[in-house]
Image: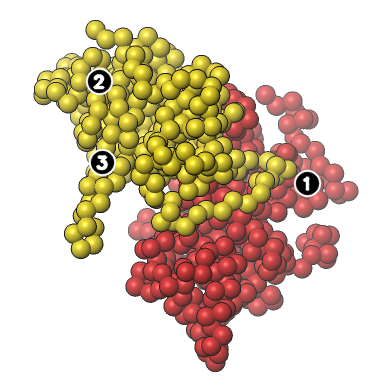
Chain colours: A red, B yellow
Amino acid sequence: MNKHEQERNPVLKVRNLRVYYETPKGDVLAVDGIDFNLYEGETLGLVGESGCGKSTAAMGILQLVTPPGRIVDGEVMLEGENLLGLPDKELRAMRWVKLALIPQGAMNSLNPTMKVSDQIADVILAHEKKYDRKRLKPRILELLSLVGLPGRVYELYPHELSGGMKQRVCIAMAIALNPTVIVADESTSALDVVVQRVVAQTMLRVKEALGVSMIMIGHDMGLMAQMVDRIAVMYAGKIVEIAPVKDMFTDPKHPYSELLIDSVPSLKERKPLKITEGITHDPRNPPPGCIFQLRCPFVMDVCRRDAPPMQEVKPDQLVACHLYQVHEDGSYIDVRDVVGNP
Amino acid sequence: MSEMLLEIRNASKVYKQRGVGGVKREVVALQDFNLNIAKKKPSIITIAGESGSGKTTLAQLVLGFTHPTSGQIIFDGQDMATADARQMKAYRHQVQAVFQDPFGVYNPFYRIEHVFNTVINNFKLANKPEARRALVEKALNIVGLHGEDVLRKYPHQLSGGQRQRIMMARAYMISPKLIVADEPVSMVDASLRASILDVMVRLKEDNGISFLYITHDLSTAYQIGDQIYVLYQGTTAEKGSTINVIDQPRHPYVQLLVDSVPVPDPDIKWEGEINLPPEEEMRSSVHSGCRFYPRCPSRMERCLTAQPPLYKIDAIDHEASCYLYDENGVAAATRQP
C-alpha cells in the first residue's frame, strides 16, 4: 500500500470490514468497509462519536458480533491468518492467546460469584490445560502486581473492589496469556479522572513491558493524546482519516477531524465555543457520495456524487476527502486554497 | 424580599444503611455545605467532584427531591423545609432541571410537542393556541431550533445534542431563575457539546438565569463556569472563581485532580505515576479529620484532629479546606452573611 509498510510489521490487517445490523426497515450499516493496519508494538486509537461504529468494528475484529448484527464482508488478518470464516473451535483457541479484549465497563464483565484468582486461573487453564497448578498462584500474583494491584486482591470477590481495581483485574486477564493484540473498548471512560489516570498509566506501562499491539477505542481526545501512537477517526461506519497522533492534533485534514480537535475543551485557555450543526443521516440509507456531506461546512458538488477515496496526503496521514488532491509526486493541494472558498 | 436567590446553609445529608447482620452504617453524602447565589448577578456555578463526592445529592436537595438531615435551603427568603404546597409549586416554577441522559427523559411514544404541552398545561403558561405556539417557538429559537423541524418528530429521530437542547428550551420556557443541570453534556457527543454549553451561557447572559452546573469534567467548567465548588466525599475541598481554582489549585486533592485531566496535546504527557491507597482506606476511613488524609501527599498530624475549615487564599472568594493555608487568614466557612 505505501512505502512505510516495509519497515513496519503489521500484526493485524483489517480489509473492507462490513458489519450490518438487521432491522425491519433494512440494514443499519454500522461498519461500512473499513481498512487499516495495526503494527507491532503500536497503539492505535479509534475515535468517533457514539453510534459511529467504533465498538461494532472492535466486535467485528474479535469475531464477537451477535445477531441481529452480522459480518457481511471483509478480511481480518491476524499474523497472516484470516479470522473470518475460521471455525468456532479454532477461534476459541485464539481468544486471550492472540486476541484479548478489555471490555467497556469492566464493572459488569467479571463474574460476581468467582474470586479474582479463580477468574484469572480460568483464563489460563482454559488455554493451557496441562499448566502446573503449583505455579498458578505465583503467576497470578505476578500478573496482579504487573497491573499495580496488591496481592490480597487474589482472595477477593469483584464486589469488594472499586471500579478502577476491577478495570485493572480485566487488564490482568487480558495480558495473562501474552496476546499479540489487545482491544480496549472505552476501558477507562466510566472512571473518575484520577482513577482513569491510574488505569491509563497501568495500561501504558504494561504495554511497554510486554510489547503488545493495542487498539484503543474511545471518544476522549485528551486521553488519546496521552496514550496512542496513531489515531483513526470514524464517522458513520467509515474511517475518514488515519494519522500519527501528532499530525492529527496539529494538522487534522478531514473536516470532521478538525471539528473533533477543535471541540476539545482546554484547561489552559478560555476559547469561544465552536458550535456545529447538523444531523447525521439515517444509517440505513446513507446518501450517495461522502458520508459527512450533511454536516460538512465545505461540502462541494462532487461530495454529493462520489465517495472520496482514501488518499495519503502526508507520510502516514491518510484522509478520505475531496478537498485534497494528491499529485503523482506525493504533494497535494487543498482545494480550499485554490478556489478561495468562503 | 431577599438579596439572595438561593442560600444553602450548613446543609448535611446522611444516609442510614443497614448492612450485613443488621450493622447500622451512616454514609455522610454531604456535610455542612454552604452556597449562595445572588439575585443581582446571574452566574454559572460549577459543582465538581468524583463519583460519590455528593454532587448529585446536592442537586437533589436543591430540587427538593430529598431533604437535608440538618441545615437549611432557602430560596428567595423562603426556607424550603417549611414551604406549603402553593410555595412548592412556585418553587418548581423558579427552579428547573436538566438531566444527564437525553435519551431517557423522553417518552418514546410521544412527539416532541408533548413535552412542551405538558409544561404549558401544568403551569398554565398560555391558553390560546397562537400564544402557546409563540411561546414554544420562542423557547426553541433560543436554543437554535425551529418548531417546524422538531415538534412533530419523535425523540428517536433527533440527535442527542438536539434532545438536550430541547430540554434546555423546555426549562427556559417556564422562565425559571435557576436551572440545575446535572451532567448535561456528559452523554452528548464531543462535537455537539459546545452547542449545549453555548445555550447555557446565553440563557445566563441574556435571560438572567443562574445555573448549578454539576459535572465531573473540569474542562467544560473552565470554559463556561463563573464559580466552582470542588467536592471531596461530601465536603467542599476548594471553592472560588473557576479560573483561579483551576489555574492555581491549592487543595492537594484539587491539585491531583487538575493534574490528572489528560491534556489534549501529544507533547504534554502526565508527569509521574500516582498510587491509590487501598479502597477501604479511601472511603471514609477518617471520621474526625480531613477526608483526604489517606491520599494526601502533604498530610500532617493535625489533619486527623478535625475537618479543616475553609481558609481564605489570597484571591477574592478563593477558599480551600486545608490546614496548609491556615496562616493566610481567618476561617471563613463558619461565618454567615
Q: Nearer the viewer, mark 2 or mark 1?
A: 2
Going by the numbered disc 3, the residue's amino acid type is: Val
Tell me if label 2 and label 3 are in contact, CB under 8 Å.
no
Q: Position of residue A160 (x, y in %)?
A: 38, 63
Closer to us: A331 or A264: A264
Q: Position of residue A5 (x, y in %)?
A: 79, 63
Q: Callout 2: residue from which chain?
A: B
- Position of residue A116 relative to residue B107, above or below, is below
Residue appearing at x 56%, y 53% in the figure = B275
Q: According to the image, label 1 marks what residue?
A: A313
Q: Quadrant of residue B163?
A: top left
Q: Callout 3: residue from which chain?
A: B
- Quote the CA–CA distance across marks 2 and 1: 61 Å
Q: According to the image, label 3 marks what residue?
A: B14
User: Which residue reaches farthest left?
Assistant: B85
Residue appearing at x 53%, y 88% in the figure = A134
User: Which residue reaches farthest right?
Assistant: A329
Q: According to the image, label 2 marks what residue?
A: B74
